[in-house]
Amino acid sequence: MGILYVGAGVNHFINPDFYKPIMPAYLPAPLFLIYLSGAAEILAGIGVLFEPTRRMGAWLTIAILLAVFPANIQMAIDYGRTQHPGFILSLLRLPIQFLLIYWAWTLTKTSKSKK
């Protein structure tokens, strides 16, 4: 899980233009938010890799997944309106988000680190 989130976070810095179109229009400073979410994903990913920080990293992962959920909804809406070829994948991404939240939640329960 940690490597997945570190990689995803790094991608926010390497390819921020990928994320711009899925940012909800009502959010200010989209580029800043892309970088902020990328940095948070990197921190969460590193956090879950190590036992002393695993619980905190898992909770941060859950917070990130909940925070970016509106962008995933927006992507599905936009892709549906424009008949984008990725529309079906954008719909599948929504329930996968809950599976990822569950996965992170299981790490909060298995970690021996302090609350």
Image (cartoon, helix red, strand yellow):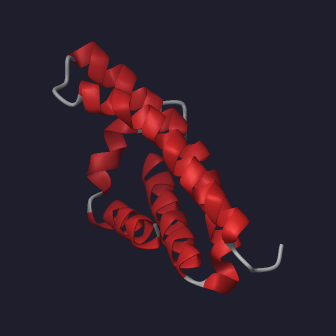
- Tell me if residue 44 comes above or below residue 28 in the rendering: below
Q: On the picture, is 28 further left or further right than 13?
A: right
Measuring from the top left, give residue 6's x and y in whole percent: 42, 71
Farthest residue to the front: give it.
110
Q: Would you say residue 60 is visible in this rendering? A: no
Q: Would you say residue 84 is visible in this rendering? A: yes
Looking at the picture, tell me which residue is in the foreground, 38 or 56: 56
| Residue depicted at 59% across the width and 58% down the height | 104
Farthest residue to the left: give it.
85
- Tell me if residue 114 comes above or below residue 20 in the rendering: below
Looking at the picture, tell me which residue is in the foreground, 92 or 103: 103
Measuring from the top left, give residue 92's x and y in whole percent: 35, 31
| Residue depicted at 23% across the width and 17% down the height | 82
Q: On the picture, is 17 further left or further right than 50?
A: left
| Residue depicted at 44% across the width and 54% down the height | 34
Measuring from the top left, give residue 66's x and y in whole percent: 60, 44
The image quarter containing residue 76 is top left
The image quarter containing residue 93 is top left
Looking at the picture, tell me which residue is in the foreground, 24 or 72: 72
- Total marks shown come to 0
Q: On the picture, is 110 further left or further right than 18?
A: right
| Residue depicted at 56% across the width and 69% down the height | 44
Farthest residue to the right: give it.
115
Measuring from the top left, give residue 39's x and y in whole percent: 50, 68
- Quarter of the C terminus within the rendering: bottom right
Farthest residue to the top: give it.
81
- Tell me if residue 86 comes above or below residue 45 in the rendering: above
